[in-house]
Image: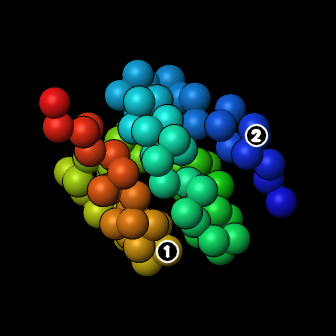
Amino acid sequence: MVDDKSVRWRCRRGLKELDVLLARFLERGYASLDAQGRAAFVLLLDQKDPDLLAWLTGREQPAEPVFAALITRMRPFLVSPAS
């Protein structure tokens, strides 16, 4: 099992936009994932940055059902709160 510090470190990417989105999810939604969801999230972090950014911003949909379900679950946590 991957510990939360390791997951936080793996969320630091080469794209600032991706860093922001992943950090936002870690702060707001990661704790609500069950063990299976956390395992899927760790696998998601193995994907290429351009793919992740496209999925998280809704420009593309992942082909893998497990990633599609996880991204759908993540999206509400990625939206900035209204000012």
Counting labels gives 2
Q: Secondary structure at mark 2?
A: helix
Q: Secondary structure at mark 1?
A: helix
Crowd around label 2: few <14 · some 14–19 · many ≥20 (10 Å): few
- Is 13 above or below relative to 61? above
Q: Is residue 41 left or right of residue 54?
A: right
Check whether the beta carbons of the residues at disc 2 and disc 1 lie within 8 A of each other: no
Q: Is residue 50 left or right of residue 7?
A: left
Q: Which residue was labeled with disc 2?
A: 6
Question: Residue most toward the left?
Answer: 83
Q: Which residue is located at x 75 percent, y 38 percent?
A: 5
The amino acid beneath tag 1 is Val
Residue 47 showing in the rendered view: yes
Q: Which residue was labeled with disc 1?
A: 66
Question: Residue most toward the front?
Answer: 83
Alpha-carbon span between mark 2 and mark 1? 21 Å
Residue 48 showing in the rendered view: no
Locate the C terminus and report the quarter of the image it occupies.
Answer: top left
Where residue 79 appears, as percent x and y from the top left, is 26, 44
Locate the N terminus and report the quarter of the image it occupies.
Answer: bottom right
Q: Is residue 72 left or right of residue 30?
A: left
Q: Which residue is located at x 49 percent, y 74 percent?
A: 66
Where residue 21 appears, as percent x and y from the top left, is 39, 38
Mark sitting on residue 42: none
Q: Which residue is located at x 76 percent, y 40 percent?
A: 6
Where residue 80 appears, as percent x and y from the top left, is 26, 38
Quadrant housing residue 60: bottom left
Q: Earlier in the sequence, mark 2 or mark 1?
A: 2
- Is 27 above or below relative to 66? above
The amino acid beneath tag 2 is Ser
The answer to which of 35 and 66 lies nearer the viewer is 35
